[in-house]
Amino acid sequence: MISPRKTLGRAALVIMVAGMTPACGSRWDVGDFGVDRPGCTGVCSQDGGPQEDSSQPDPGMSDAGTATRPTEMSVAQARTASPGTWVRLRNVVIQTVEALQVDDQGHPQGSFWVVDPANPKQGLWIFKSSEDLPTPYAPKVGDRIDLEGWLQCQSGFEPFTAYRPQLVGRSGAHPTARLVITRLGTLTPPADHPVSPSTGFGNADGGFGRPNPEYAGSRVHLLGPLSLTNPQPRALQRESDGAEAPSFSGFEVEGGILVRDDTTSGETDGGEVRCDWRQKALDGGTVVFPQGLRGVWETYSYAPCQERAGTDAGCLRLPALVPGTQTPDGGVNKFTYVLHPRNCDTDLVGEWDAGP
């Protein structure tokens, strides 16, 4: 019997994302970040984020019904907090710095993940703008910090990070607010969690699944050896109108695990070739990771780009989804979990056998 997953083509994808969102009762109408809740997800159902969790402690409220102080909570609680919640995280450690740049005034801004050293199984994505406090602070792996900011769902039109929970300062609801970071010292970050693909960890089911959200935002070590099985997985295809040829954001390894290779493929700005294992596999032969793979276990989604006919205004982003996951009943998976390696030296060490 042919799987219904394979009966819808690219045209159906464009129609689906342009005019529909998953209906109540579809396969993914549970808490959108792995917390099972019946029915639709409430306010964030339009943006794929978590809904209000009544088990969280209530913040202090003014007579006008606005919070007067942040709610102190754990990293795991913050991942499922209602968007707009004022959050305080205490004594967390920076485990991974994703990106960092400096503005014209010398103020750093960028994104990073923090974990709770006492319970490091989940992490939370943080964005520090150049205006967040203290402005001179540059996040570093191993910094032990306190944080105050607002939980926000990434926009459903962000190309790769749509629907992801993050802690920020200024946002639409709080245009003058600031993320406040208090550096307490340094601490060796927790070791990568060893997880075994042989037991089913990380199987994304071709992009239809949301595997192991209990590890979201933390670093994991996928125990090896592991072979690269598919250099062009449908779930990681970048679909856009007008594209001359399909491009991909990563590859799949045995066990159905999707790996994003944005920081390890292609060339550096200086022209140095990175460890582009996907391209090696396309060239022929086999790619094996003898010691497995490491990286951040986090969400992935892709927002297709629709060209604006007759203009030079660039493209129009459509709502993000996992490509190829439309179902005959009108459902679509808006995001999945994949491995995000950060470097070639420790996270993505492989071997290529070109064959005869």
Image: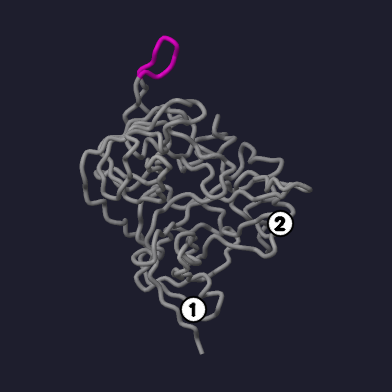
Q: Quadrant of residue 248?
A: bottom right
Q: Name which residue lies at 33% across and 31% down.
A: 88
Work out whether 12 lies above or below 282.
above
- In the picture, the quarter occupied by the N terminus is bottom right
Residue 77 image position (x, y, % from top left) = 37, 35
Residue occupied by mark 1: 286
Circle 2: element type: helix
Left or right: 277 with respect to 218?
Answer: right
Q: Nearer the viewer, residue 160 or 101?
A: 101
Residue 159 image position (x, y, % from top left) = 57, 49
Left or right: 135 with respect to 51?
Answer: left
Q: Assess whether residue 269 is covered by the magenta stretch.
A: no
Identify the mark nearer the N-term, 2 or 1. Answer: 2
Q: Amino acid at mark 2?
A: Arg
Q: Name which residue lies at 47% across and 55% down.
A: 338
Q: Amino acid at mark 1?
A: Thr
Q: How is the image coloured?
A: one colour
* Cα–Cα span, label 2 and label 1: 29 Å
Q: Which residues are magenta?
A: 60-68
Residue 3 image position (x, y, % from top left) = 66, 60
Packing grade of label 2 (10 A; few <14, some 14-19, many >=20) is: few
Residue 160 image position (x, y, % from top left) = 54, 50
Work out whether 274 lies above or below 35.
below
Q: Assess whether residue 62 is covered by the magenta stretch.
A: yes
Q: Name which residue lies at 65% across and 40% down.
A: 21
Q: Name which residue lies at 61% across and 57% down.
A: 238
Left or right: 202 with respect to 89?
Answer: right
Q: Residue 10's mark? A: 2
Packing grade of label 1 (10 A; few <14, some 14-19, many >=20) is: some
Circle 1: element type: strand
| Residue placed furthest toward the bottom | 356
Work out whether 239 lies above or below 231.
above
